[in-house]
Amino acid sequence: MPEHYDHLETRGAALRDSEEFAVLHGIVAHAMKAPGWAKHLSGVNPKSVVSRETLAKLPVMRKADIAALQKEHPPFGGLNVTPPGQAKRLLMSPGPIFEPEGYGDDWWGAARACFAAGMRADDIVHNSFAYHLTPGGFILESGAHKLGCAVIPGGVGNTEQQLEAMAHYRPSAYIGTPDFLKILLDAAAKGGKDASSIRRALVSGAALPGSLREELRTRGVQVLQCYATAELGVIAYETEAMDGMIVNEHVILEIVRPGTGDPVPDGEVGEVVVTSFNPDYPMIRLATGDLSAILPGLSPCGRTNHRIKGWMGRADQTAKVKGMFVHPKQVAEVGARHSELKRLRLVVGREAEQDTMTLMAEASGLDVALAEAVAATLQSVTKLRGEVRLVAPGSLPNDGKVIADERPVG
């Protein structure tokens, strides 16, 4: 069985840089055919973008900027080169932010991650990422298809039906969030269903603490994770070495000082900024809002691209809960719908290997009906269930923090 997807993964650093930057100026010029990029990169000479140093001089584009641009210039803020009517799918992520999917093999760059997780041609893969509007299901499915795998489109929820499909088709691999894999295995054990065929898993969209990874390992499943976004596809992925995440070959990754576009030295924690080579929907220095750091040295797996430490939190207060982003503006919207509430703080935690949300809300009285109404609003706005605790006015810290992510890292 080959150890690497192709020769690109084992290029020397100098060769990789020379080959990537030989074409990057053309990608920048191509992106500037789109009015949004032409405006954002106004004054930039694409031919000057020939190194990491010259790339770092370009302005960053933030996800919040994309949302604002899309409101002004729907559907994609003028950042798409390929017209919407020529896309394969038109998708929507929480926020909302709208994304296209184009035609072509492995459009999201997911095949390397699937390959590193052990998937091969003729494998059957169970995919529990969402297929409804959001791109999650399609991102990883495209990688499995590129490798020649058959995919069970499980989607989210419907645990009993998913277990029935798994017992019938006996997939060897799972794609989805780690939380839901545990739910499926727990439900199978409780209900006497057979999920024993699952031996490998590629997970994303939620935290994978070491305790959960070990529990799944003891149940016979080797779990690796990948880092992906709807704008960029798969950015980085784990290998069997489990020594950081390998940066994907279709992107250039930088770590910058949060709030700036200035690269930090290797090893220093900063914000992940990514440039993609996607011809339909290129991204030039997209600031993801995620924190990470470049690891020193090369991976024991033999792949030679940069490695990042993995997800280390958010550069802003946005949090990813059960695979969905929750934004400070959503917390503010909950408060706006209930005038009885004062200061709010959404606490994100972790219990029984599941993400939890608790909205701490200052209110004059501890009204059970109000708490229930606020909980309903919280679910309506974020699409996630959370507990609401009403507390006395003035009891929450006056530190400007709207979302407190208290989950353990690592």
Image (tube, helix red, strand yellow):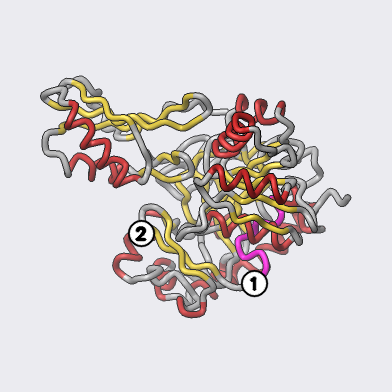
Please provide the residue range marked out in magenta: 104-113
Q: Quadrant of residue 360?
A: top left
Is residue 69 or residue 348 the one in the foreground?
A: 348
Other-residue count near label 2 (Cα within 10 Å), few / some / many at <14 / 14–19 / ≥20: some
Residue named by callout 2: 67
Please indicate whether residue 275 sits to the left or right of residue 174 in the image: left
* 159 left or right of 169 in image: left
Whether label 1 touches label 2, CB < 8 Å: no
- Residue 334 seen in the figure: yes
Outermost residue on the right side: it is: 1
Residue at (54%, 73%) from the top-left corner?
88
Q: Residues within 10 Å of mark 1 (few under 14, many from 20)?
A: few
* Magenta residue check for 105: yes
Helix, strand or loop at label 2? It is helix
Report how many numbered discs are placed on residues in the image: 2
> Where in the figure is residue 103, as x and y percent of width and height?
60, 73
Q: Which sits in the foreground, 69 or 183? A: 183
Amino acid at the residue labelled 1 = Gly
Q: Which residue is mark 1?
A: 104
The residue closer to the viewer here, 91 or 180, is: 180
Q: Nearer the viewer, residue 374 or 83?
A: 374
Three-letter code for the amino acid on which mark 2 is drawn = Ala
Indicate the quadrant containing the C terminus: top left, top right, bottom left or bottom right: top right
